[in-house]
Every structure is written in structure tokens, then in C-alpha cells.
Amino acid sequence: MEQVIEQQPTAFSWQPYAKLSFIVVWLILFSFISIYLIVSIWTKGKFKSQNVLLISPMRFTKFTGLGNVSEPLVNLKLKTTQGYENYDFLLDSGAVVSSLPYEMAEKMGQNLIYLPRLALTGYGNATTFAYQGTMMVDMAGNTYNLPVVFTNSGTTNFLLGRKGFFDQFTINFNNLNNTIEIKQ
Amino acid sequence: MKKILLFIDKYSFKQLFFAVLIITSLAMTPIFTSLSIQKTTMNSKAAGLPLTTPTPIFYGSVPKNEPKINGIKPYIGKSGDEIVVWGENFGDYPFGGTLYMGNIKINSITSWKQDEIRFVIPGEATSSLFSIRVGNWNVIFEKPITVYNQTTTTTVHVQDGRLEVLKPINLKKVVVWLSNNDKPLTKIIEKSVNENTWRFPDTVADINWISLYDPQNQLLPFIQNPIEY
């Protein structure tokens, strides 16, 4: 006599559902994180919101024949041996690195005698010597250690150059509000 | 759906967890590598000292006329400091061109043009005469470059034409070249203001070069504030 075995429909317990949920949740999280990271790499943080560190009013100087011309000056707190002191810096994207006059080195507790020396070719192919140091500036309560050179060129005073400044911060000349904004 | 559930049910929670862990790790490795490279590049921007220039390639022809050194600036420095040499017929990155400070070969040459050479004082250099060797020429500059280090205490101070040597050690004479005179103005210091301060007898204007010597006529290192030269 033939035995007929009737196949019962499989009754699933909670475990496969739990496993499936685990995989689905993982897949969703994995996809979101991957997309976010890939987009971050692709855009190199271009769409990251930037903190405004400093808003400085634009200053104007009257030139004969030209009228009022804006001066790219910002007032920054510079660390000296006497604490932080305010100085006007000229934003100079043409300068390789920020510079200060020789005399500031001593005020900032740095000895020119022991700082590394470079020869720089300036305006009109004139050779000047610069001593590489660092300066600590305060912007919106945050301190930044920036590379600086101390130079003897009489006309150039406090400059903010590309190395360490223009390549670290976003500088926006807002002609609508007559302000200079420094963002990070 | 039933098939999926059956398939998933074949594996334990432990197996599924490890599978997910391995897949996540494998997929995230290239992403995190790219991110860390990007962050390192961003963070290193401000701390990118020193400002270096690539080593030039020497391929130019040897100068036909003898090179002439007209001047060196400054006359003092420490290891790693840049020095500028002015003159004529240096060649343009001449093949086989070499620079020396005494017997020490200068390897770090920043630039070499017809009328100007820039180099960095080597680590092992001491106060000595500078020379250029190119082709069959060997030109030595008459005034020695003073090299100091962190331990140098002897200080030269020039103010209002008054030259003082502070904390001199074994000092015999001070040689000064003036900008309007090619011949050195040599003064042997005999009197001191006090033990720690020696003063040049006359006031001197337009100082071009200073060298200090001991009784054996050996160069003495000294420090001087760059504001003064």
C-alpha cells in the first residue's frame, strides 16, 4: 500500500523575518552612508556650510583722479608677548606668504637670528631677505597658527598671503554690504 | 518572498552578521582611504613650511670667460640659511658647476644664473671662504662667510657707526670692509670697555662686511641681528 505524504506548507517562525529586517536595515544604512561619503569625496566638501569667522567693514581711500577706492584691509588680533593686539592686515593674494616687518619678530617673542632665512625676489627684481616664522591670530575666538615671513622691505607692512591664509580660508569681498568676509 | 525567507533562514544570525561586516569593510576601505587623503591634504596646507623650491637641473654650457664674484649677501648665516652671490660669467646652470664653503661642497643650490647664484648653507659648514668651480675655473671670494649656530654667544652690535662686540671669546681682531672701499679696514682690538664689551676704536659708516679673528688668525663665529645688516 502506497503511503501518501502530504507536504505541509512551511510555517515560518519569527527568525527569518528578523534576519530579513536586519539585512534590509543594513542595506538602507549602507546605501545612505556610501552615497553621502562618495558625494563628499566627489565635491571635496564644496557644499559644506562655511563658518563666517570675521566680517570686516570695507575701507575706502580717496585717490586723485580715481575717487574712492576700496582697501582690502582686515583688522586681526595678533599674539604678541604682551597678549593679543589688533593690527590692520592687507589681503594680498599676490603674496606667496604672509609677511610682517622685522621689528614685529621681537614683539612676538621670535628671534630673527635663529629663524630660517630665504632670499626673495620682490618688485623690480630687488632681492630681499625674509625670515620664516609663525604668527598666532585670533578670529572669532578661534586661534590659527599661520606661516609668516619677517621682511625688511620698508613699504610692505602687514600682509596676508596665499600660503596658510588664502588656501585655508574663503575670502569674500561683498560689495553689496561693503564688507570683507572671512569664512572657513 | 518565500524563497528569500528560505534562503535567509539557511544562515544563522552570526553568519549574517559576519557577512554584513565583511561586505561593509570591503566597500568602505576605498572610500575612507580617499577621505583620509583629502583631509590630510586640507590640514597640511597651513603647516606647509618651509617654502621649498625644486633642485635645479644643471645642463648649461661652461662659461667662456672667468667668473667674477662681485658680492655676497649677507656675510653671516647659519645652516639652512639662503645666501645670494652676485657677479659675472657664472653660466646658466652650467654642467659640472659646484660651490664650496672651505672644503665643504654645497649641495643645496637654489638657483644658478649668469649673474646670480643662490644657495643654502650646508649643515656641516663652518666660517670659511666661498668658492665657485666651473669648468677649469676656481674662483674664491676674498671675504669669508661667518657661520654661527645655537651655541654661538659672541654678538656683534652696530649702532650709529659704533661697532661693539659683546661677550667676545678669544677675540684678537675685527676686520671691517666698508662699502666705499674694497680694501679691508683692519683694526686690532686692544682695549675693552669692560670684560664683556669690546668696542671698535673709530666710528664706521656703511659697513659692508665684518669678520672676527682669534690670535691664531682663525675665524670666530658671531651672531648679529639681521636688522643691522
Image (spheres, rainbow, N blue to C red):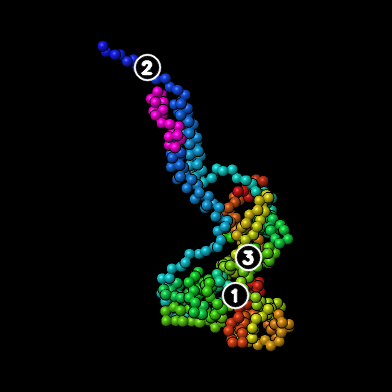
Looking at marks 3 and 2 on the same chain, the residue that comes earlier in the sequence is marked by: 2
At x 54%, y 55%, the residue is B44
Report whether B8 appears left or right of A56: left
Residue named by callout 2: A8
Disc 3 to disc 1, C-alpha distance: 20 Å
- Quadrant of the snapshot with the N terminus of chain B: top left
Which numbered marker is on residue A150? 3
Dot 1: element: strand
Q: Is residue B84 one of those drawn in magenta?
A: no
Q: Is residue A57 above or below residue B194?
A: above
In the image, which disc is placed on residue B33?
Answer: none
Callout 1: few (<14), some (14-19), or many (20+) C-alpha neighbours within 10 Å?
Answer: many
Chain for numbered disc 3: A
Of A88 and B45, nearer the camera is B45
Image quarter of the C terminus of chain B: bottom right
Dot 2, crowdedness within 10 Å: few (<14), some or many (≥20)? few
Q: Which residues are magenta?
A: B1-19
Q: Amino acid at mark 3?
A: Phe
Q: On the rendered structure, is A101 left or right of B95? A: right
Q: Is residue A164 visible?
A: yes
Residue at 71% over, 84% down: B192
Residue B137: percent from left, percent from top: 44, 81
Q: Secondary structure at mark 3?
A: strand
Residue type indicated by callout 1:
Tyr
Indicate which label's residue lies in the foreground, 3 or 1: 1
**Callout 2 and callout 1 share a chain:** no
Compare residues A154 and B136 and report the one nearer the observer. Answer: B136
The answer to whether residue A124 is seen in the rendering is no
Q: Which residue is mark 1?
A: B148
